[in-house]
Amino acid sequence: MSDPVSKRMREAQVTVVTGASRGIGAFLAAAFLEAGHVVVGTSRSGGTVRLPGGSELSLSAVEVTDDAAVSVFVEGVMDAYGRIDVLVNNAGVIDAEVPFLESDPLEWWRTVEVDVRGPYVMTRRVMPYMVAAGSGRIINLNSGAGTRAADRASAYFVAKTALSRVTGAAHAAGFDRGVRAFDLMPGVVRTDMTLSMPSHAGRTEWTSPQDVTDLAVALAAGQLDAWSGRFVRAGVDSVSSLSAAAGQLQDRARQLVLMPYGVDDPLG
């Protein structure tokens, strides 16, 4: 007789969540576990974490910017489970909220490395297995910061803009091969990071973690595949509203594009 736990693991979706030790990553890991996924979480230090809701999750210690470490991690997941169905690139940092001309170059570049190189390296190592399987979904935790420029915390804004291009590249490379990629903007969730940010001091309205996790679980389940290569935003979008709007998506909708200056713009 087959082991029922092993059978469950063979049948469940295998989902990798980076930065799963706290904040949005912990909420996501808990939600995927609740949805029946096999969740493989990472953090820089590893260890065991108690997730929202009380579940415990053992985390792999992985520096997401280290290609060699990521390769070893991904191969280990494949050896253990035989596949990776969903990749959630959540691990990220933010630079100090100081004016651009006062920013520290080392901190600035480290922010870009973690927030762009990290998702790129993880996607680069996971996606070939998804392509070989003919299916897979990649969810990149982006931000409204990625849609505009700002003077303060400029590295974070730059990184999230660049992340949308990583998402777009994965979409372009994988769409005809069964792989989908999404930019998920979580809004402003009450976490240790957001509570420490001066820009959110005194905030009383927060995005519900469930609004984020509902979208993420639906994206992973293939309910919103029409939105591959595009932004979705928790707290504004819902699974039902996105499903209803899927049939009327226009070319380049919810993507970062160059806007023409007028009807005569040669770049329009």
Image (cartoon, rainbow, N blue to C red):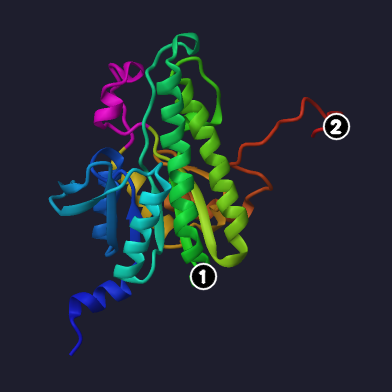
Q: Amino acid at mark 2?
A: Pro
- Please identify the quarter of the rendering in which residue 63 is found: top left
Query: Would residue 112 be visible to someone looking at this image?
Result: yes
* Residue at the spot 49% in from the left edge and 59% down from the top edge: 127
The span picked out in magenta is 188-207
- Horizontally, residue 231 falls left or right of residue 23, namely right
Residue 91 on image: x %, y %: 35, 41
Q: CA distance from mark 1 to mark 2?
A: 41 Å
Find disc 2 in the rendering and name its residue. 266
Q: Of helix, strand and loop, which mostly describes the magenta segment?
A: loop
Q: Nearer the viewer, mark 1 or mark 2?
A: 1
- Give the farthest residue toward the front: 68
Q: Residues within 10 Å of mark 2 (few under 14, many from 20)?
A: few
28 or 215: which is nearer to us? 28
| Residue 139 to residue 155: above or below | below
Find disc 1 in the rendering and name its residue. 132
